Image: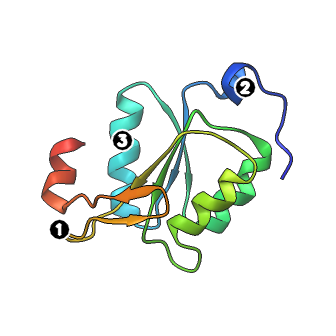
Amino acid sequence: MALGSTGAGGISAANAGMILLVEDDNRTSRLERFVLERAGYRVTHAFSGENALEMFPNFTPSLVLLDVMLPQMDGFATCQKIRECSQVPIIMVTTMNPGEDKLRGRLLERPIGRLQRRLIL
């Protein structure tokens, strides 16, 4: 995947403050988008890992908020594909049960419970 012209940090000036939200659940994505936009960020939404990867050649966001539990291509596979072409910061988001922390590659998987997620957002 070829990326467009970028400035310092690999982020183009046009995409500074842009967050790519990768979330398949409509209710969750609406909530996350509302909170982020209210905080002043611009948000582009992808409903799947495949959809996110299709968007990537056209722009490089400042941050990717990536759901772990996506259909077909999960968040880990999506993250790996993004890493092949970009060093954009990625935050992995999950609602798995508390206590399911595990090490996966160089990533500590630390789930956020539904109640904790509501409090954080």
**Residue 10: x percent and y percent?**
71, 29
Q: Nearer the viewer, mark 1 or mark 2?
A: 1
User: Which labelled disc corresponds to residue 12?
Assistant: 2
**Residue 86: x percent and y percent?**
70, 44
Q: Amino acid at mark 3?
A: Phe
**Residue 37: x percent and y percent?**
41, 33
Residues under labels 3 and 2: Cα distance?
24 Å
Label 3 packing within 10 angstroms: few (<14), some (14-19), many (20+): some
Residue 48 at least partly seen: no
Residues under labels 3 and 1: Cα distance?
29 Å
Label 1 packing within 10 angstroms: few (<14), some (14-19), many (20+): few
How is the model colour-coded?
A: rainbow
Q: Residue at x 40, y 67 (%)?
A: 25
Say which quarter of the image contains residue 99: bottom left
Q: Reading the chain from its start, which is encountered first: label 1 or label 2?
A: 2
**Residue 11: x percent and y percent?**
68, 28
Label 3 sits on a secondary structure element that is: helix
Give the side of residue 7 with respect to residue 26, left or right.
right
Say which quarter of the image contains residue 36: top left
User: Which labelled disc corresponds to residue 34?
Assistant: 3
Q: Amino acid at mark 1?
A: Gly
Say which quarter of the image contains residue 6: top right
| Residue that numbered label 1 is attached to | 99
Give the side of residue 31 with respect to residue 42, left or right.
left
Quadrant holding the C terminus: top left
Q: Reading the chain from its start, which is encountered first: label 3 or label 1?
A: 3
Q: Are marks 3 and 1 in contact (CB under 8 Å)?
A: no
Residues under labels 1 and 2: Cα distance?
39 Å
